Image (tube, rainbow, N blue to C red):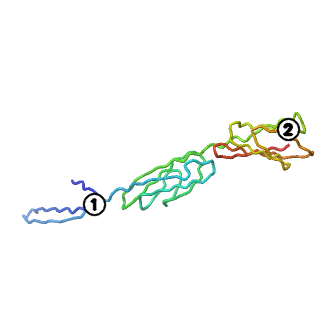
Amino acid sequence: IVSPNVGTTNYSVTGINSYGCPASDTTTVTVNANPTVSATANPTSVCPGEEVTLTASGATTYNWITGVSGTTASVTNSPTTTTTYEVVGTTNSCSDTASVSVTVKALPDATFTMDTTRMPTITFTANNTGASDYAWNFGDGVNSSGSTTGHTYTANGTYTVVLVVTENGCKDSTSASL
């Protein structure tokens, strides 16, 4: 039994058969180095539905085995939950595995309430008070910002109010008619 190092080694064996005749043979053994595979994600943190590019390097061929399927060095995916992606890279029949995690941030709460007790002025209050941005569209061409805002409608009618909330770089929206 031999345990050759990476590289090419010649091995010879000589034996004598039952008639006393010697015979020998030589074989060449090539030991390939294992590849060193690495995996990256760009970006490493996304909002639900956003695309991420996963890239592997360090081998000749690749097989993404968890979270996404593909056999190229670079694949794209739109994860809906935080996921660890695993890829197997192969060179000269030797393999290595690498993984990379992508964090999926939660969408902000974009729901809101309307206080109509002081018509025609209505107070709108976002249920999410920790967001970084609130964009209100009152359906009559007027916009506002802030987690709580008031608006006075100058004409009777049905209006669709839209709130877009931004938190940790993720946006979500909701609408209500009045």
122 vs 53, left or right, is right
| Residue 50 place in picture, x, y as percent | 62, 52
| Residue 140 place in picture, x, y as percent | 86, 48
Is residue 174 something one can see in this rendering? no
Disc 1 target residue: 7
Q: CA distance from mark 2 to mark 1?
A: 79 Å
Q: Secondary structure at mark 1?
A: strand
**Three-letter residue code for mark 1:** Gly
Badge 2 or badge 1: first in the primary sequence: 1
- Identity of the residue furthest to the left in this view: 20
Disc 2 target residue: 122
Front position among marks 2 and 1:
2
**Would you identify the image quadrant in which residue 110 lies?**
top right
**Three-letter residue code for mark 2:** Ile
Q: What is the crowding at mark 1: few (fewer than 14 residues within 10 Å), some, or many (at least 20)?
A: few
Q: Nearer the viewer, residue 21 or 149?
A: 149
